Amino acid sequence: MPTLVQEFTEVFRTEHRGVRDLLLDLVQAFRLGDTERVRELVGAVDAATGPHFRYEEESMYPQLVAIFGDEYVDKLLADHDGAIRNVRLLHELAGHDELTPLQAERGIELTRQILPHVSDCDGLSIMVETFPEATVGDILSTRRTARAAGLPLLTWAMTTRNRDV
């Protein structure tokens, strides 16, 4: 049976890979001007990142302050702020029946701006490995609660998140 740390690492990396793949597919959909696929993928990104960002902010990031300090954790939160703004703008672009080349390029740019956080954040799992099992258990519990609530990113950001964007 895997330890809580192993469970966390597996689900955390799986979630980041999933978001990475959605974002890369979204770039491709914008390239192709496939508005139906753009709408589908923007909705999927919104749905996948809501619970993920929520448990990171509510449970994991506060624990990381002891390792990195406030400044770096503030950067992680600012990255989330930027992703929320970008997803909001991606939803606006996805609302068009057709995309102009300029709109498609903007969609690619907005999507690419989110990608570095996905890859950078994935590396945080090696820091979580240093936490006591009970702390990792708390993070996993918060994750279960966030996933059960199932709030998409923009809904969570507007209704539950303790930080305005």
Image (tube, rainbow, N blue to C red):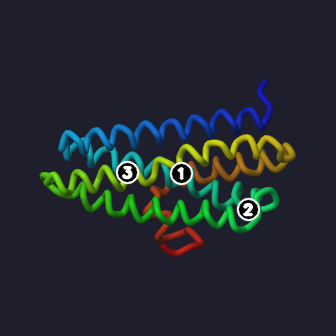
Q: Residue at x 33, y 44 (%)?
A: 41
- Rendered view: 95 above or below 125: below
Disc 2 residue type? Pro
Question: Crowdedness of circle 1 by 10 Å Cα count: few (<14), some, many (20+)?
Answer: some
* Disc 1 to disc 2, C-alpha distance: 17 Å
Residue 122 left/right relative to 33 = right
Q: Position of residue 39 (x, y in %)?
A: 27, 49
**What residue is disc 1 on?**
117
* Disc 3 to disc 1, C-alpha distance: 11 Å
**What residue is disc 3 on?**
111
Disc 3 residue type? Thr
Whichever of callouts 3 and 1 sits on the residue coming sooner in the sequence is 3
Question: Crowdedness of circle 3 by 10 Å Cα count: few (<14), some, many (20+)?
Answer: many
Secondary structure under the numbered disc 3 in the rendered image:
helix
Secondary structure under the numbered disc 1 in the rendered image:
helix
Whichever of callouts 2 and 3 sits on the residue coming sooner in the sequence is 2
Q: Residue at x 16, y 51 (%)?
A: 101
Whichever of callouts 1 and 2 sits on the residue coming sooner in the sequence is 2
Q: Residue at x 77, y 37 (%)?
A: 5
- Rendered view: 27 above or below 105: above
Mark drawn on residue 62: 2
Residue 146 left/right relative to 105 = right
Secondary structure under the numbered disc 2 in the rendered image:
helix
Q: Residue at x 59, y 72 (%)?
A: 162
| Most foreground residue, 127 or 165 | 127
* Disc 2 to disc 3, C-alpha distance: 27 Å
Disc 1 residue type? His
| Most foreground residue, 135 or 142 | 135
